Image (cartoon, rainbow, N blue to C red):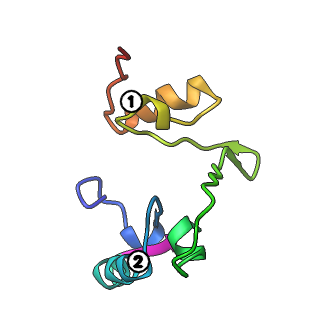
């Protein structure tokens, strides 16, 4: 963001995927004064009792009627129904298309 002259306080970082409460606090301490933060509701955040956990995944696909996307270096984790929007994001953020195989 700094390189693009974007005020980081106007953006929100959302962390998820295997978070524990100690790791969430660690991330908060590191980024709290730099940007807005959010933490995904994950297995370890909702069930830290040492019991068997259910593996449930919820993925955001649209927000306020607009598409959203998750870019990843893992083909199975890329999420976007709108291929035009996905291509736009890849161009803007200089993310090359993945080659599966």
Describe residue 41's horizontal placement relative to residue 21 as left or right.
right
Quadrant including the C terminus: top left
Residue 43 vs residue 65, the one in the foreground: 43
Q: Quadrant of residue 42?
A: bottom right
Residue 90 vs residue 19, the one in the foreground: 19
> Would residue 14 be counted in the magenta stretch?
no
Mark 1 against mark 2, which lies toward the viewer? Answer: 2
Residue 91 is marked as 1
Is residue 28 depicted above or below 41 in this figure? below
Q: Quadrant of residue 71?
A: top left
Residue at position x 47%, y 62% in the image:
16
Q: Is residue 40 visible?
A: no
Point out the tag, 1 or 2, that comes first from the N-terminus.
2
Crowd rating for badge 1 (residues with CA inside 10 Å; few <14, some 14–19, many 20+): few
Residue at position x 55%, y 41% in the image:
69
Is residue 10 depicted above or below 26 in this figure? above
Residue at position x 37%, y 82% in the image:
22
Helix, strand or loop at disc 1? helix
Magenta residues, as a range? 35-39
Residue 48 is marked as none
Crowd rating for badge 2 (residues with CA inside 10 Å; few <14, some 14–19, many 20+): some
Q: Is residue 89 visible?
A: yes
* Dominant secondary structure, magenta: strand
What residue would you read off at disc 2? 24
> Would residue 38 be counted in the magenta stretch?
yes
């Amino acid at each position: 963001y700094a390189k693009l002259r974007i005020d980081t306080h106007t953006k929100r970082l959302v962390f998820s995927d295997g978070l524990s409460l100690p790791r969430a606090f660690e991330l908060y301490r590191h980024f709290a004064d730099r940007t807005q933060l959010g933490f995904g509701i994950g297995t370890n955040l909702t069930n830290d009792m040492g019991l068997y956990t259910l593996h449930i995944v919820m993925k955001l696909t649209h927000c306020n009627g607009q598409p959203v996307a998750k870019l990843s270096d893992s083909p199975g984790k890329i999420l976007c129904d709108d291929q035009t929007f996905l291509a736009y994001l890849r161009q803007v953020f200089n993310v090359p298309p993945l080659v599966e195989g």
